[in-house]
Image: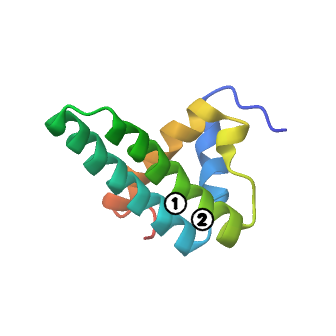
Amino acid sequence: MARFDSFREFYPFYLHEHRHPVSRRLHFIGSCGVLLLVALSAWQRNGWWLLAAVACGYGLAWIGHFFFEKNRPATFRHPLYSFLGDWVMFRDILLGRVRW
């Protein structure tokens, strides 16, 4: 198991684990769904939408890993860095730094 002393060290590994374009797209769509469901939860003042947000985000991401990347999600080994990686990659896709 690789050990990372910082997120800066981890992020290149994270991107390497997301080489397949379908996987990156599923991550991006899942993150969009998370944002919408969190907003819906706040608007309706219903915490159940937060559970749906978690299911949406992780569900689509894990489909990408298990069926397209054929690897194990970094969430299992590096949960905090993986969570941060999802949002940094989301931003980088929006900015055109990572291919959609």
User: For the point 45% across and 63% down, which residue is it?
Assistant: 98
Residue 79 visible at all:
yes
Q: Quadrant of residue 67?
A: bottom right
Q: Residues within 10 Å of mark 2 (few under 14, many from 20)?
A: many
Name the outermost residue toward the right.
1
- Residue type at numbered disc 2: Gly
Q: Helix, strand or loop at disc 1?
A: helix
User: For the point 35% across and 37% down, which residue is it?
Assistant: 48
- Left or right of 42 on screen, residue 37: right
Residue 8 visible at all:
no
Residue where numbered disc 1 is placed: 60
- Left or right of 8 on screen, residue 39: left
From what the image shows, is residue 60 above or below residue 87? below
User: For the point 66% across and 58% down, which residue is it?
Assistant: 16
The C terminus, quarter of image? bottom left
From what the image shows, is residue 88 above or below residue 63? above
Q: Which mark is residue 64?
A: 2
- Location of residue 18 in the rendering, given as x and y in whole percent from the top left corner: 61, 61
